[in-house]
Amino acid sequence: MTNEDPKVEDTAPVGETPPTATPVRGPAPAAPVQRSAIGTIYDLVTRHWPLVALLSSALLLAIAHAFEKFGGLAPCHLCLKQREVYWVAGTVGLVGLALQRTPFWSRLRLPLALLLGAIFLYGAGLAAYHAGAEWKWWPGPKTCSGGDAAAASNLEAMLKGTAAIKPPACDKAAWVFLGLSMAGWNVLISLKLAVWSVLAAFRKSETLA
């Protein structure tokens, strides 16, 4: 007999495995949210709206000049006024594109996008007035003159640039597609651009990708 305390051996009985400690796990990390195609388009367009507004205005001006050059459709007074809207919008978009890389963009993004929205909304109203004059809903401006409507099927002459120049007429649709004249289509396009401008103005993130 000794005064020493008996040693307790931490051993498992023969044939049995020692108990293992179960690690405590926290909550599983959240899976990355996959953005839908619509969300991706929305983010890209609103994030880079000055560039999109500039390219959209340039494209529409190019289409208008192509109808004049290759289609032989000289612009009327209201057509030229609608082109001026896109010249102004393109200029504002170019200025916004330059300001995006400056420290002032966080404060100027909202007013610039709203300014673009107002410009496009004015263009939509001007195009609606033109379309209404074509439909004889109200009289057009005094600068309107008579002219025959051109068939949209004369594609070969348009591509070759041999179509005869027709006198401009604000109160007659020179070209119709799916029941809408160029002024009618411009209403829809301008309204769409105005809506995108508002969405770009009130987007949450201001940081460029």
Image (cartoon, rainbow, N blue to C red):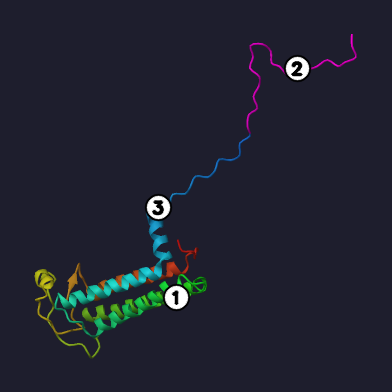
Q: Which residues are magenta?
A: 1-23
Instruction: Examine the structure image and report whether residue 9 is included in the region drawn in magenta.
Output: yes
Name the residue carrying label 3.
Answer: 36
Q: Is residue 22 above or below residue 166?
A: above
Who's the residue at 51% across and 70% down the image?
Answer: 106
SS class, disc 1 = helix
Name the residue carrying label 2.
Answer: 9
- Callout 2 amino acid: Glu
Quadrant placement of the N terminus: top right
Report which quarter residue 139 is drawn in.
Answer: bottom left
Who's the residue at 32% across and 70% down the image?
Answer: 55
Marks 2/3: CA–CA distance: 61 Å
SS class, disc 3 = loop
Q: Earlier in the sequence, mark 2 or mark 3?
A: 2
Residue 112's mark? 1
Q: Earlier in the sequence, mark 1 or mark 3?
A: 3
Marks 2/1: CA–CA distance: 79 Å
Q: Earlier in the sequence, mark 2 or mark 1?
A: 2
Report which quarter residue 140 is drawn in.
Answer: bottom left
Please rate how many residues cluster around mark 2, counting C-alpha atoms within 10 Å: few if below 14, some from 14 to 19, many from 20: few
Q: Nearer the viewer, residue 99 or 77?
A: 99
Q: Is residue 118 above or below residue 9?
A: below
Quadrant placement of the C terminus: bottom left
